[in-house]
């Protein structure tokens, strides 16, 4: 009998231990299930950080647009992305930290209990996730060309996804935007405070989606004018109408939630960046009041920049201005002045949009001056070489130059304008290193190793995995 009691006691003890061991394997600070809202917020933050950063390991576009240049280590100013493996990091951030979180947010959202009467809120959430996903994929396409898309998120069954044709991706992205817009109801809620950009305002997300469609329509203008005009004219009536509509992600005053520029320019203690001569010379020539917002003065009280690609003493030249080193500076994902430049281009191309090219062009410049708090845009616009329809430059050349100046602190958008319009920068060679102006990032080296067959096929399809290979929409 005693043996039976002994055995029962041991069973109970072991069962208790097993339960405790099981509990020990659960980290209460790392939940096994993450809410869809948290995943969405994290994706927004990661996307914003990638866009805002000027860390040379992550984002080189302020250098390539010749807003800034480097002082000592000039590899990136000379278009070298391989030494630091920059394409690998960009590819990783957009897929792993943005698109993957968005896909998981959508998956988890489908499993969450829907409170009766909030069905449209769920529809709105799904649509906003789709809009953010379009933003991420469009950046990837305009960065690399053909990229994994239809098979990209099927990690359980396919670790070596094929690369989809970039033009095919573009068309599917616009179809996704159209579907999202059609399903959204601005009278219902969405993510609320979990949305770091618009605070859950559905109408604002709809305007952003229309702006994204407009942008993609303009980007393909030389490649497919018919489809370009279709997308642009469909989107144009419903896009941003003032700086109040800007798509921005705000930052806080303390790490780790400051604007990455603050980390790169202040907290790091490094002295890597100064103004580039290209932008300061241009803005000085046109007496542009935005200079005081963009840069500090040099020791002589002037605005000056170093020669892109050359080593330049940090102390001798203008630095990024006070606004740029504010830890709370919001990162801009899309802006009203950007929209107005696209509308000006659409009107100049003869598309059926409301308003003249000159009016939209002036709206864009006024919006840029307003955003930066520069003042006296009227005097600037009155100059012969700035005003629409006067001077020696064509309308398209003026759009290219003025959008380049306005897109300061949005290096990727500026770089895309430069690649499309081939103005105002000289594109024939790197500043100091022989070679061509970069038209894309080369594919990540990891893809060559881990996804070799798909990489080889993609490289062949786009005309070679080279920085000088033009993307599908860059036909001029």
Image (spheres, helix red, strand yellow):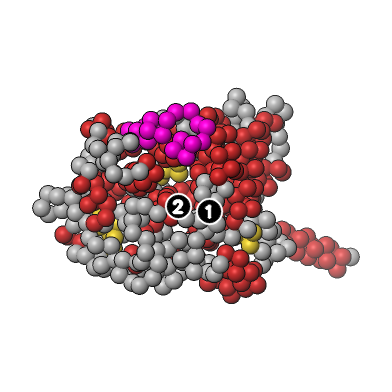
Q: Residue at x 41, y 73 (%)?
A: 83
Query: Which residues fall within the magenta stretch?
Result: 346-366
State the CA–CA distance, disc 2 to disc 1.
8 Å
At label 1, counting other C-alpha atoms closer than 10 Å, the crowd grade (few under 14, some 14-19, many 20 or more) is some
Q: Residue 434: give x, y in percent of width and height.
A: 35, 72
358 is within the stretch colored magenta:
yes
Does the CB distance between marks 2 and 1 fall below 8 Å?
yes
* Residue 440 showing in the rendered view: yes
Please, which residue is most extreme toward the bottom here?
Answer: 449
Q: Residue 8: give x, y in percent of width and height.
A: 83, 62
Q: Residue at x 55, y 57 (%)?
A: 472
Residue identified by numbered label 2:
420
Q: Residue 367: give x, y in percent of width and height.
A: 35, 34
The kind of secondary structure element at disc 2 is helix
Q: Is 113 displayed left or right of 469 in the figure?
A: right
Residue 473 image label = 1
Q: How many marks?
A: 2
Image quarter for residue 60?
bottom left
Q: Residue 303: give x, y in percent of width and height.
A: 18, 50
Q: Residue at x 30, y 70 (%)?
A: 432
* Residue 328 showing in the rendered view: no
The kind of secondary structure element at disc 1 is loop
Dominant secondary structure (helix, strand or loop) of the stretch shown in magenta = helix
347 is within the stretch colored magenta:
yes
Decide: is 216 above or below 381: below
Q: Is 74 displayed left or right of 440 in the figure?
A: left
Q: Is 165 displayed left or right of 390 in the figure?
A: right
Q: Residue at x 63, y 38 (%)?
A: 178
Figure quadrant of the N terminus: bottom right
Please, which residue is most extreme toward the left here?
Answer: 300
* Upstream in sequence: badge 2 or badge 1: 2
């Amino acid at each position: 009998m005693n043996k039976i009691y002994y055995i029962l006691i041991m069973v109970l003890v072991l069962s208790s231990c097993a339960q405790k061991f099981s509990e020990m394997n659960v980290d209460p600070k790392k939940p096994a299930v993450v809410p869809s809202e948290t995943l969405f917020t994290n994706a927004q933050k990661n996307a914003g950080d990638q866009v805002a950063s000027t860390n040379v390991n992550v984002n080189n576009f302020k250098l390539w647009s010749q807003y800034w240049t480097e002082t000592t280590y000039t590899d990136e100013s000379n278009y070298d992305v391989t030494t630091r493996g920059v394409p690998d990091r960009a590819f990783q951030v957009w897929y792993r930290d943005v698109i993957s979180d968005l896909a998981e947010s959508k998956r988890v959202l489908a499993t969450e209990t829907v409170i009766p009467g909030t069905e449209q809120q769920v529809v709105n959430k799904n649509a906003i996730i789709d809009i953010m996903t379009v933003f991420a994929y469009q950046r990837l396409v305009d960065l690399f060309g053909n990229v994994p898309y239809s098979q990209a998120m099927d990690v359980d069954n396919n670790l070596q996804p094929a690369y989809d044709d970039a033009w095919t991706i573009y068309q599917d992205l616009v179809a996704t935007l159209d579907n999202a817009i059609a399903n959204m109801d601005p009278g219902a809620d969405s993510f609320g405070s979990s949305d770091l950009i618009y605070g859950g305002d559905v109408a604002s997300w709809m305007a952003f989606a229309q702006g994204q469609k407009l942008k993609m329509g303009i980007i393909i203008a030389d490649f497919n004018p018919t489809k370009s005009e279709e997308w642009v004219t469909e989107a144009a009536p419903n896009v941003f109408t003032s700086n109040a509509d800007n798509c921005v992600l705000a930052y806080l005053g303390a790490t780790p939630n400051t604007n990455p520029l603050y980390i790169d320019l202040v907290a790091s203690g490094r002295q890597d960046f100064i103004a580039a001569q290209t932008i300061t010379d241009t803005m000085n020539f046109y007496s542009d009041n935005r200079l005081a917002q963009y840069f500090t003065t040099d020791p002589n009280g002037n605005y000056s920049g170093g020669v892109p690609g050359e080593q330049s003493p940090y102390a001798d030249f203008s630095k990024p201005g006070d606004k740029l080193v504010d830890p709370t500076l919001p990162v801009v994902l899309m802006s009203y002045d950007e929209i107005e430049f696209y509308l000006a281009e659409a009107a100049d191309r003869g598309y059926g949009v409301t308003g003249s090219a000159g009016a939209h062009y002036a709206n864009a410049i006024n919006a840029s001056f307003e955003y930066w708090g520069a003042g006296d845009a009227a005097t600037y616009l009155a100059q012969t070489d700035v005003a629409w329809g006067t001077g020696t430059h064509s309308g398209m050349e003026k759009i290219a130059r003025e959008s380049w100046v306005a897109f300061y602190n949005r290096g990727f958008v500026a770089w895309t304008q430069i690649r499309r319009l081939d103005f105002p920068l000289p594109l024939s060679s790197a500043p100091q290193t022989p070679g061509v102006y970069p038209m894309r990032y080369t594919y990540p080296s990891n893809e060559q190793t881990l996804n070799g067959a798909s990489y080889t096929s993609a490289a062949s399809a786009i005309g070679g995995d080279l920085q000088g290979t033009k993307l599908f929409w860059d036909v001029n």
